[in-house]
Amino acid sequence: MKKKIKALVSALTAAAILACSSVPAYADKVKTVDGLLYRYSDSGESKGVYTGWVKKGADRYYYKNGKMLKSCWLAVKGKKTYYLRKNGKMAVGTIKIGGKYYTFDEKGRLYEYGGDSGGGAVSGTSLSERSISTTGTAITAEEIREIIEREKVNIASVIRLETPGAGDINISLVGYSHLQTDDNTIALDFVTLPVFSDNKLIGDVTLFRYDGEIHCTPAAGGPGWAIKTNMFDQNPGKDIAFVYAGQYMELMIAPDDTIYKMWEGETPLDDVADRYAKYATEYNTFSFSKMIADKNYVTVPAGTSNITLR
C-alpha cells in the first residue's frame, strides 16, 4: 500500500521547488508596500508583486510573490541551486547548513558538498554531478505537528493492532523524504515519520500532500523496522540516508557507505562509489538519536486507543 501511494505521489509531483530564470538585473523599479515588494514600470504603473532576484550592494536576495525567501534552498530550472541564508542573503563560499558544509561559487551556485567537517568535497563527489532535484511543496514542521497531534490516537491504535503489548507509542515529528535513484528526485510532499516504543522502531507514518490536503497513513508489521533499529543502534548520532533504488527496493545508507536493506534482494548500488556522499541530502537523511535527544516526538501512553477488540 505504501509503495502504491509513493508511486502515485511521485507521478503527481512533477514541478521543481521553484522555477525561475538565472540571476537577472531587473529593468523595472521595485518598491516595498505594506511589507511586500512590488514591481513598477518606468511610468509608475504597478505590475504586481515581484518574484525574482534583487541586488542590494554586493549581496543578492530572492523574492517570491513579494516576500523575501530566507533559510531555504532555491532550485533554478532544476539545474542550478542556491541557498538563501536566514537574513535572506544568497550564500557564497563554504557555509554550514543543517550540520553539513556546502560550497557555493562567486555567483551563488552550489558547487559541492563538503561533508560534516567542511573542507573539500567528500571523495570528489559534487552535488552538480549528482543532479539531484526536488519536486512538490514541502510539508512544513508546523503542518507535521498539527496533523500528528490531531491524529496521534488513531495512529497509535493502528500500530498497536500489529504490535500488541507495545508500551508508550512515540511518533516522531521529524522524518525524511525518499530519494529515488531511477531519476534522482526527492518528493518533498511525501514524508516518512518513524514510530517507536522502548527505543525500537515498530512502524512509521506517511504524510503526503494530494489535491491540496495532507493525508496520513500509518503502517506496521514485518521485520523491516527491526532492521532500521539495528541500523540506528550501529550508527548512533549519525544521519542515515534513505533511498528508493527501484520500485521495491528501500535502502538506508550509513556515512561509512554501509547499505541496509528493508527487503532481501540484490542491491543496485553495489558498484556505486561514495554512496553516502552521492545520495545524502538534507531532505532524505534522519538521525534517530538526535530526534530522541531533541525530544522531537509525540507520545501516546500505553493503553490509549480508540479501537475496542471484541
Image: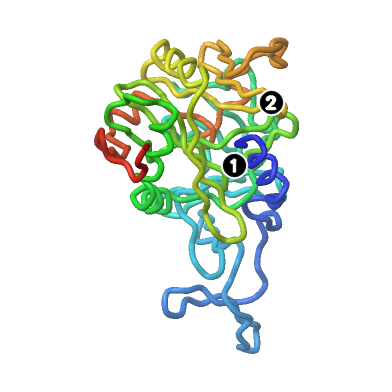
Whether the residues at callouts 2 and 1 have beta carbons within 8 Å, the answer is no
Question: Does dot 1 land on a helix, a strand or a loop?
Answer: loop
| Residue designated by label 1 | 106
What crowding class fits label 2: few (fewer than 14 Cα within 10 Å), some (14-19), or many (20 or more)? few
Q: Is residue 94 left or right of residue 14?
A: left
Q: CA distance from mark 2 to mark 1?
A: 41 Å
* Residue nearer the viewer, 76 or 250: 250
- Give the residue displayed 64% in from the left and 40% down from the top: 6
Q: Which residue is mark 2?
A: 248
| Element marked by disc 2 | loop
Residue 118 location (% of width, % of height)? 47, 24
Please state which amino acid type lies under the numbered disc 1: Glu
Q: Can you say which quadrant of the picture contains the C terminus?
A: top left
Nearest the viewer among 72 and 16 is: 16
Q: Amino acid at mark 2?
A: Tyr
In the rendered view, tell whether residue 273 sits above or below residue 104: above
Name which quarter of the figure residue 284 lies in: top right
